[in-house]
Image (cartoon, rainbow, N blue to C red):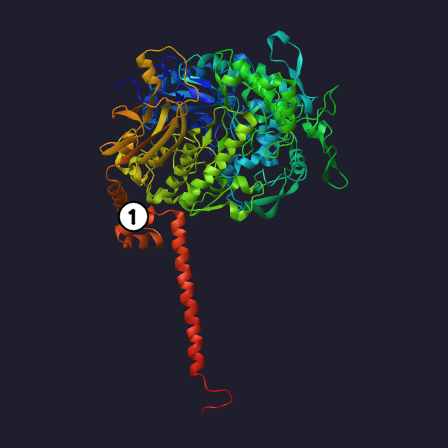
Amino acid sequence: MSSRYAAHDLSDAAIGGSRLRIQNGQFIDSSGRTVTLHGVNVAGSSKLPTTPNGLSHLHEGFYESHRTVSFVGRPFPLSEAPLHFARLRAWGLPLIRLLVTWESIAHAGPRKEDIDVEYIDYLEQLLKLMADFGLKCFICAHQDVWSRFSGGSGAPGWTFQVAGLDIETFSQTGAAYIHCQDEKHKQQNGTGKKEATGAFLWPSGYQKLAASTMATLFWAGDALAPKLALDSLDDQKDGQKVGVQTFLQSAYIEAFGALADRLLPLEACIGFEPMNEPHRGLINLHDFHSWNYDTDLHIGHYPSLIQALALGSGYKQDVKFYVKSWPFPTRVSHTSTIDPNGRSCWLSPTTGSDSTAEQGAVDSLAALGHGLGACLWRQHGVWEWDESKQVPVVLQYDYFEKDHRQGRQGERIEWYRDCFGPFLKRFSERINRSRPGAFTFVEPIPNEFIPPWIPARVIEDATLAAEYKQAAYTQKYATRTLIDTPRPGGETGFVYAPHFYDLNVLFGKMHSWMSVNVQGLSRGMFLPKALYFGALGLKKNYTAQMGRIKELARASLGNVPIVVGEVGIPFDINSKHAYKTGDYSKQHELIDALISAMEKLALGFTLWNYNPDNRVEYGDGWNFEDFSMTNGDHQHADSSAGGTPGLQPDFRNAAHEQDPLYRGGRALEVIIRPYAVKVAGTLVATTFDVDTLFFEVHWKNPAKPAEVEESDADAKKRRTTEIFVPAYHYRHKRFSITTTDAETVFDAELQTLFVTHKDTRPNAVHKLKIELEHPQAHRLHRLRERRALVRPHGVIDRLERLCPESIVLRWNAMSSGQIWSIVLVLMAVLLTVWTVDRHMSRFMTSRAAPPAGKLEL
């Protein structure tokens, strides 16, 4: 069979001259074939400006230039884009989750004329190049912990001025943990107390004052901060006042709307994700005096909300400091006194922030004012300072549970129903003005299951709607609510895009022989049941957790397409052992388990992340995270050439290090893998074993055949499944292909296997296997490669190298269950020998002892 297009080519021409569509919860091409979406996030560095250099550990110009920054060149310069796109195409990862922050397009201000047109021009050119390589993307409106100025990424600095917050005071008042300010403090004052800092601290910023306040105002500021009003951004409502929520959301939606106007008409762009990892802020607050240990990461200095409010107004507080621990994630190490020395993080009417003064007056920003001139929540009567006792006092414990607007006082607020759903609707409506039918990718709050979301067909039926509501408020797996806003994109444009990380590995930066089902453990699972052992156990663990995400998504949303928006690992686990030895085996094991689980569950995904700016010195450049599957330190061991001394490449990639398509790759042997991209039917499951290169895929025919008039060629294409078979693994190897009922044609140049099945019965299942002719020889080659390229380390590794190759191969081929059986048998034998020896010793001692009552002289 001849074809111009590779399996993993997602260009409009390759999928039949039209755009991707959604039908019956699947992405399909013009021939009705299911399209499997595998891809990557590009890139972690896109959270940070290029000018000035925004790497999160650098403090030069951090405050002074926040309104004049440039993101042009993120994720990479246009001149380098063809190489990076060629790499992703060669790796079989044609879907890009392209990160764009609100700050990158609207750092100058909230109005239309403040939009950074130069950066949008750059992105437009980037997407035009993307289409040339058969790649597709969706734009992720990215944020973490609200903004760079509250320790994360996303929102522009001027948004804090809207709330009356002074960004330059956050570190001193404990309102945020900011990486570059922490580094600056170390440089100026030394390390001081042994209080841990690092990549694991940033998530705690969600509960600190700056980020939690801004999230609260963005989602429900009109209801919770009714005293704060600003001039409308709507030209037709000039002079009218609007609430802070309306102001912020209007600015946000219009900024990304301007981006959508330019990008959605392009072939490469398939949709938008309204917000990365949203957070409810203080809405439905757990407690003023403590946070929820099961859902909120307690690490570093962790003030309660009432303490954070006091600190923000300049009052010193004794704050608990949390450190990592076991079996619970963290424990209190000690208490530190944080003293702002009377400095408030709130702007006063007479003084703006230093950065505001230095940059001069800006008309669109002058209208933002300075909030309410003091603590926003104090001004709304939430709390007060008791001068006599010198403590903060909560005045309204249920303040963040209900509406405080005139005429709506006391109405209960639920975040998913009243905030999230309506925002998504507004965002989607604005985006779809650019191109009706664009996909909307939606995710819940991280580590939460999305609650029931009523479908359009149910809304129109009163009886069904009542039953749906009853079920929604009695279920126990998610927030007990019902999202009753119409879904963005409707039945043909809504995509569920949850995230998944192994929080134990993510937080602990360790992986050995045991893994933990954190998802289950945080919901009351018995600890022994949450433990898994070995590589096979790891796969079972991830399959169980992601299977639960899929199962409950079906319960809440019905049959919608699922693309796991973020999934990945920190590569700097185990004290960066891999960087010194080149042995990335543990990283391979983790990523293989993640992808294997998603393949088994037939889930699409975009891995986190592809970042050419990654360096071992500072990782992805953001809060010391190091997740990139590619590393920019190309001269690995040659410091004279500008590389990092002693740095070793992934030894499994050593044979490819001279090829620009693969150079600097990490764990590529498990990331690059065969899979069915365009499926003539429905994908059931996929299996891939990197040790033997064994691949198996199952798919089935539709339950109801398509009733269309078509040519023989079109009918054949409808029955043809296209499988990506990577040259990275199979080039120069002899392999066999077996199928249940199909004709196959392999095109090595296109890295594509075309499979045309014969059985057209409804629901008929098809199977295909790819097997090396000599898998044992391949396993032996891998063993010898490891022994040749990786220095022995540790007792077990040294003992393994003393064993004959045949024994090692047999041992490696065993499942964890078989290994544990052998270990238990050996333990039983040793226990038996020890018991017998002990009894024999006692027996011999008793025989040798003199008779009782006699004395030997």
| Rendered image quadrant of residue 783 | top left
Residue found farthest to the bottom: 857
Image x and y of residue 399, in percent? 71, 30
Image x and y of residue 115, in percent? 50, 15
Q: Does 226 sit left or right of 517 as displayed?
A: right
User: Quarter of the image containing the N terminus?
Assistant: top left
Residue found farthest to the front: 761
Reply above or below: 842 against 754.
Answer: below
Reply above or below: 758 against 619.
Answer: above
Q: Look at label 1 and name its amino acid.
A: Leu
Image x and y of residue 93, in percent? 37, 27
Q: How many marks can you see?
A: 1
Looking at the image, can residue 423 be seen?
yes
Looking at the image, can residue 619 be seen?
no
Name the residue located 77 percent from the left edge and 40 percent from the top edge. Answer: 388
Q: Does 319 sit left or right of 746 as displayed?
A: right
Reply above or below: 764 against 845.
Answer: above
User: Quarter of the image containing the C terminus?
Assistant: bottom left
Disc 1 target residue: 809
Q: Does 145 sit left or right of 42 as displayed?
A: right
| Numbered disc 1: secondary structure | helix
Residue found farthest to the top: 236
Reply above or below: 848 against 100.
Answer: below
Out of 470 and 534, give the one closest to the viewer: 470
Callout 1: 10 Å neighbours few (<14), some, many (20+)?
some
| Rendered image quadrant of residue 125 | top left
